[in-house]
Image (tube, rainbow, N blue to C red):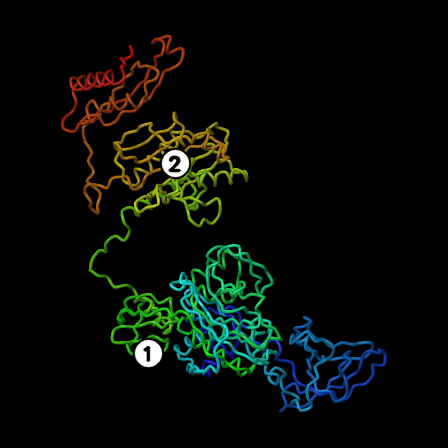
Amino acid sequence: MKFTLSWLKDHLETSATLDEILTALTDLGHEVEEVENPEDKLGAFRICRVIEAVQHPNADRLRVCRVATWPNGPEGAMEEVQVVCGAPNARTGLVGVFAPTGTHVPGTGVDLKPGNIRGVDSNGMLCSERELELSDDHNGIIDLPEDAPVGVRFIDWKGVNDPMIYVKITPNRPDGLGVRGLARDLAARGLGTLKALDIPAIKGSFASPVGVKIDDSLKAKGCPLFAGRTIRGVKNGPSPDWMQARLKAIGLRPISALVDITNYFTFGLNRPLHVFDVAKVKGDLRIHPAAGGEELLALDGKTYTLKPGMMLISDDAQPESLAGIMGGELSGCTEDTVDVFLESAFWDPITIATTGRALKINSEARYRFERGVDPAFTLPGLELATQMILDLCGGEASEIVVDGAVPDTARSYRFDAKRVESLVGMEIPEADQRATLAALGFTLTGDQAAPPSWRPDVQGEADLVEEVARVASLSKLVGKPMARALPGVPKPILTPLQTREKAARRTIAALGYNECVTYSFIDQTAAAAFGGGADAVKVDNPISSEMTHLRPDLLPGLLRAAARNQARGFVDLALFEVGPVFSGGEPGEQATVATGLLIGSSAPRDPYGSRRPVDVFDAKSDAEAVLAAIGAPAKVQISRKVPGWFHPGRSGVIGLGPNVLCTFGEVHPRILQAFDVKGPAVAFTVQVANVPQPKVKTPTRPALSISDLQAVERDFAFVVDAGVEALTLVNAAAGSDKALIESVRVFDQFTGEKAEAQMGAGKKSLAITVRLQPQDATLTDKDIEAVSAKIVEKVAKATGGTLRK
């Protein structure tokens, strides 16, 4: 949003300085992006008089001028300067504009220095309009009237000392897209008084020859209100200099009085308008949805093909305008225009945004309508614009033609002065709060506050608090420590799940993994490879084709990261991530997991031969460390019911019955090939939320229980079939006496041809160590033999194995 300081002062009676206004705008939420102050660029240029201009002795097209200038203003002393000038209109007695030595000339980008031109000294410069960037005229130097006050700054005499301010308006503040809206905020802050906006009541002297009609299908939403009137006998010449200066300052090119007036209202009052040349309109104007396929030559010179449902303004013969976005070239106004139809309407923001985006049209009208203009100002804006056209272009106005009605935006919310302190922490008297809301246009009745029609962003009680705090200035907010509700030790802030996430993250990092933070969106192919990719998790408006679905697992993102690192020469990788995964698109179909990925070798190369490829046991040990850190029980079950992205023979699942705690193993070669990752690669995924909570929730650890009786270890070697898993044998031995047996571990495996030669074809030997820890009394030989017999019996029953002789 761009405007000039004088434009702002048309709506705000203020004595505040430019710096005070800029500071207040930013503090009110309208961030000032840029300020162009003509004083900074043209402040050094002063009106001068040429005392004498004579022919240059060594150049036919140059003149040597004696210039009278007043560097300190007309009240200061006159100084005479010699300037060599090549302008054809340089003459004795000319009143022009002088730039002294050291001045930066914006039109040329040159900093003036003392010079010598063809043997004659020259100090300073007599300037043209192009050199001051006032116009493209460079036929000669500026020739001012004889009565122009010499010594006065040129920008002050010309009236162009009007700073341009560029403010960044947030999408929720459409009222800030008009100069008056910004003036209202500044007035509420106390930087001045908002000037009254007198709405004229212009009585039409004849019936409008152009009528308007809104299709019934659009009245409810697309176009609730369309109004206009004919103004005949206008003279469409150039707009006044003051209007052209303001439009030029904000980057708009003046076109004609009629067009410039509509642009002036767009920026000044946030009221986009449009004018039709009545001579080019056939019959009445109709607002209707496009059937599809219609073509419109717009004012930007481009032809647009419309899709079904887009709103059009058409006459009896053809489309004339793209509603709320851009007018058509066929009914546009020219210098020959005599009769015009002035349109003012309210358009649905969503419909305008959808059409503008589909056609890729960016216009000031679209920018405002899609954010929401004031519907109640539709008819007053028409009256004001009519008056300006009559004042600047002459003519005679018809009666207003209207279809539809102003949409009802009335609503109110409870006003509680205490909520400012509870929500924001600022102590503001209730009288000041009410005065602030009233200055912003709110209507207060008892404990109810009704927002004005130009504030569609206010949608609740909290918004009232925001307005009060914003105008009072959040910069005055003083930080205070929060008061404790109860004395003593405060309750934990983190939830149990958050505590587990933190513990899992710290544990995996301590194991040497590097944390990754990847997008929760992946492509459909990658999602399908990990059991996802359904329509339930498809993103309606994806950022790119590689982010179309919510991720079902963290491994796709880690594998992509690993592939990028390997492409850059990093072969051995240890990556992890803790984050959400999605099994569906509904609440409750999201889980938090911790995933680690190991690729390459376990250690760097060294002379001791300790380097080896990572394997499933690396993933298993790291997974068990994470489970222990987040409170998983020590005794768990391991199964092989792994998902398809793990190697079926080199992976496992750690769980408690059907409750899966962790999946670990080698990543399937098919997955590695699909993600362009060079293996070996192992991974684990811990289901953080599936670990059961402790039965006794105390702030302290349980008492340490250590038996002072001597433990006993016994070794057993069993001959079993080659296909028997060691885990089956270990579980059978451990289950033979759960109270006495503390641990069971495998310490030897004898397989191969030699083993089969001794024990028979298809056989192998597994040796285990069983540790017995008594709790009540020292074990006797009889006790140990009894337990050993149970172990042999249980293992034989579970595996069919026998003790090795």
Residue 461 versus residue 61 in the image, above or below: above
Q: Residue at the location (80% across, 81% down)?
A: 63
Residue 219 versus residue 662 in the image, above or below: below
Give whichever of 63, 327 is nearer the camera.
Answer: 327
Give whichever of 178, 199 is nearer the camera.
Answer: 199
Which residue type does callout 2 highlight?
Answer: Gly
Describe the element under mark 2 as helix, strand or loop.
Answer: loop
Residue at image mark 1 = 435
Residue at image mark 2 = 531
**Few, some or many residues within 10 Å of mark 2 (<14, 14–19, 20+):** some
Which residue type does callout 1 highlight?
Answer: Ala
| Identity of the residue furthest to the left in this view | 776
**Few, some or many residues within 10 Å of mark 1 (<14, 14–19, 20+):** some
Q: Tag 1 or tag 2, which sits nearer the N-term?
A: 1
Describe the element under mark 1 as helix, strand or loop.
Answer: helix
> How many numbered marks, from 0 up?
2
| Mark pair 2, 1: CA separation | 60 Å
In percent of width and height, residue 208 lies at: 49, 76
Of the 4 image quadrants, the one containing the C terminus is top left
Give whichever of 642, 230 is nearer the camera.
Answer: 230
In percent of width and height, residue 351 lies at: 44, 60
